[in-house]
Structures are given as structure tokens and as C-alpha cells.
Image (spheres, rainbow, N blue to C red):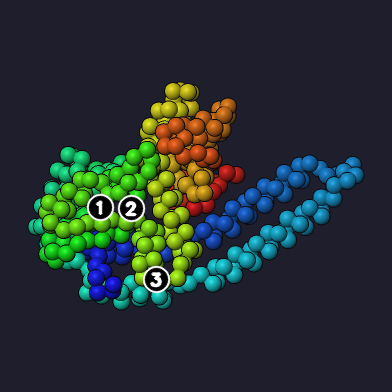
């Protein structure tokens, strides 16, 4: 199988472009967790002190000192565990075994980049495709924005570039293509009543028309399942489940981003003031059915929380638009002067 694998240049380019960001993002939560713990522990101690449990007339049954010791011991134990986790965190800047394996696996199996002239023509072609709604890639315009003239690296064009490089390679080799991807957006997959049927028919037609080759497309977890069966390898259920969970989470997040305007419209239909307030917020993160909505100022957050049933209204709108049930809404104050993934106030959720 190793002799048959190949990736478009765009895949390799995006992997290396985003690699350092991912490595750094995995380091940040350690300190964020420490700050959240410190802040909330201090507030808990402050609120406990206000109860005056040890004043002139101490409470007859509550031993405040014992409670404080329990909390301090728990915090100390957690800090020790967090320190150990951080110390055991691999230093991918010094040694990245995964990078070594990937580099070795795809040695001489990566497509070639475009010349500047061909790249300019390609961008014009992709712009035309997006205007006509030709997949894939146009869904990226919703969250990555419309590329501006002269943009040297338009983020919204990545999927289309990848696709056109696949077509070019199949034209050259004249062999069938098995495309494995973690993409979940609707401009890649045909869905009926929420069920994924297969690749978009336009993709199948374009590949067949331009290459006269068979085309198969699998989501990563599904390909692993089929490969294990076909090659009679032992089932790695944990691996398959992990990939499936990642794909599911990614799809829900992409759906939330692209459908957020529709969700806000549904909310406005039930409560105009709440809908207007959501226009001042932004989606920050989504994990384990927990959606974080960020506001730039504490006042906006407080106004949101003061609305009766605000979180249930938003959760209901998400179910109405996307069919995603039991979404828990949390709000946070985003700090524009710090990285977008840091928060303040009690409802801080680290991602």
C-alpha cells in the first residue's frame, strides 16, 4: 500500500503551515488551567470569608478551617498532577517522531507546487467555481471570508486547490483514486435527511469526465475500518472510535459556524432583544456538547444571563436548525488583548 499513497502539494503545505500552531496550542492549556484554578479558588475563599463562619458567633456545625484544608489539598494535588502532565508532554520542537514517520512515509509521494503564473490562473478559476456553486470549497467562504484581490494565500481556496491537484494527478497516472479525508462539510458530501450518502454527485461527475477514472471517497474512520477488514488486521477499536469522535465534533462545529446566522434569526423570532444581543457575541468553542459564546464586555455577558431562559432558547434554536440536541450554552468574556482562546469571569471554559 505504501507504493500507492500520495498527497497533493496543498495537503503537505497546510500540514507544515499549521503544525507549529497546533503544537503551541497544546502547550497553552497548562498555564490557563493554573490561572483558572487560582482565580476561582481565591473567589471561593473570599466568598467563604463573607459568610463570617468564624466570627464572634461561629457556626455551631460548619468547620470552615476543615473545608479550606480540603480545598487547598485538592488544589495542591491537582497542581502536582498538572505539573507531571506538563513535564511528560513531548517537546515536539526538539524531537517529533510523528513528523519523522510522516516525512518518511510520504518521501517522493507529494505533488508539485504551481508556478506563480499557473497559481494566478488557478485562483481565477476557483473564484469562478465558487460563484457558480461548484464543489468543493465554497462552504469555506462562510468562516474564512472571501479572498481579496492580491491575497497570496487565500485560506478559503484550500479545498478547491486540493481537489484540482487530485484531478491533475489522476489525469497523469490514469488510475482509480481512493481519497481519504476528515472533511465533513456539505460541499464534499451528499446528505439526505442528515445521513451521509457519499461524495457530492458533482465531484464524481467531474472526476469521471476529466479523468475517465473510478473515484472513491471515504471519511478517515470508515477507511480504517474497511482497511482493517480487507487486510485481515486486528481491530483497533480505540483508534477507530477516536477518529470517529474527532470527525463528529469537527462536523458539528463547522455546522454551528455556518448556521450561526440562521440560529440567531430563530432566537430573534422568539426574543428580539436576545437575538440582538447575540449579534454582539461570537462562537468561541464547542466540545462534548458544550458551546461557548463569547462577548467582548462583561456587561453584554451579564445582559445575556439576565434574560429568562436565554440558554434554553439558544439551545432550542440549535436543535431546530441543525438537529443537534442537548447543547449546553456557556458564556464567557473574551479578552481581545490576549489570544482568542483565553477568557475571564467565572464561566471561563478553556479550549
* Residue at 63% from the left image edge and 55% from the top image edge: 38
* Residue linked to disc 1: 159
* Residue linked to disc 3: 232
Quick one: SS at disc 2? loop
Q: Nearer the viewer, residue 155 or 219?
A: 219
Q: Are marks 2 and 1 in contact (CB under 8 Å)?
A: yes
Q: Which mark is on residue 88?
A: none
* Residue linked to disc 2: 183
How far across and how far down the image is residue 21, in percent? 38, 61
Of the image marks 2 and 3, the number of the one nearer the N terminus = 2
Q: Nearer the viewer, residue 76 or 16?
A: 16
Tell us which disc is closer to us: 3 or 1.
Answer: 3
Assess disc 3: are there few (<14), some (14-19) or many (≥20) residues with their C-alpha within 10 Å of its C-alpha.
few
* Residue at 15% from the left image edge and 53% from the top image edge: 208
* Residue at 12% from the left image edge and 51% from the top image edge: 209
Looking at the image, residue 121 lies above or below residue 30: above
Of the image marks 3 and 1, the number of the one nearer the N terminus = 1
Tell us which disc is closer to us: 2 or 3.
Answer: 3
| Horizontal relation, residue 223 to residue 212: left or right | right
How far across and how far down the image is residue 107, in percent? 25, 75
Q: Nearer the viewer, residue 178 or 280?
A: 178
Amino acid at each position: 500500500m505504501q507504493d500507492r499513497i500520495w498527497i497533493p502539494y496543498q495537503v503537505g503545505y497546510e500540514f507544515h503551515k499549521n503544525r507549529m500552531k497546533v503544537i503551541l496550542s497544546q502547550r497553552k492549556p497548562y498555564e490557563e488551567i493554573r490561572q483558572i484554578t487560582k482565580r476561582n479558588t481565591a473567589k471561593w475563599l473570599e466568598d467563604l470569608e463573607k459568610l463570617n463562619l468564624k466570627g464572634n458567633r461561629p457556626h455551631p456545625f460548619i468547620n470552615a478551617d476543615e473545608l479550606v484544608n480540603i480545598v487547598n489539598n485538592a488544589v495542591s494535588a491537582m497542581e502536582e498532577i498538572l505539573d507531571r502532565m506538563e513535564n511528560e508532554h513531548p517537546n515536539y520542537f526538539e524531537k517529533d517522531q510523528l513528523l519523522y514517520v510522516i516525512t518518511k512515509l510520504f518521501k517522493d509521494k507529494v505533488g508539485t507546487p504551481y508556478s506563480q503564473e499557473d497559481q494566478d490562473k488557478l485562483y481565477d478559476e476557483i473564484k469562478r467555481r465558487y460563484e457558480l456553486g461548484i464543489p468543493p470549497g465554497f462552504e469555506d467562504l462562510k468562516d474564512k471570508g472571501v479572498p481579496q484581490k492580491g491575497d497570496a494565500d487565500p485560506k478559503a481556496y484550500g479545498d478547491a486547490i486540493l481537489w484540482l491537484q487530485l484531478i491533475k494527478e489522476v489525469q497523469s497516472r490514469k488510475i482509480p483514486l481512493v481519497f481519504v479525508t476528515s472533511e465533513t462539510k456539505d460541499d464534499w458530501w451528499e446528505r439526505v435527511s442528515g445521513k451521509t450518502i457519499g461524495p457530492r454527485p458533482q465531484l464524481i461527475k467531474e472526476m469521471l469526465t476529466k479523468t475517465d477514472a473510478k473515484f472513491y471517497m471515504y471519511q478517515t474512520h470508515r477507511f480504517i475500518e474497511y482497511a482493517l477488514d480487507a487486510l485481515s488486521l486486528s481491530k483497533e477499536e480505540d483508534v477507530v472510535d477516536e477518529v470517529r469522535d474527532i470527525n463528529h465534533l469537527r462536523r458539528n462545529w463547522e455546522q454551528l459556524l455556518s448556521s450561526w446566522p440562521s440560529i440567531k434569526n430563530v432566537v430573534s423570532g422568539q426574543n428580539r432583544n436576545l437575538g440582538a444581543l447575540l449579534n454582539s457575541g461570537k462562537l468561541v468553542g464547542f466540545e462534548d456538547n458544550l458551546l461557548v459564546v463569547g462577548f467582548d464586555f462583561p456587561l453584554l455577558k451579564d445582559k445575556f444571563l439576565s434574560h429568562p431562559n436565554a440558554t434554553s432558547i439558544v439551545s432550542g434554536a440549535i436543535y431546530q436548525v441543525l438537529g443537534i440536541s442537548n447543547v449546553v450554552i456557556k458564556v464567557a468574556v473574551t479578552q481581545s488583548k490576549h489570544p482568542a482562546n483565553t477568557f475571564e469571569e467565572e464561566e471561563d471554559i478553556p479550549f
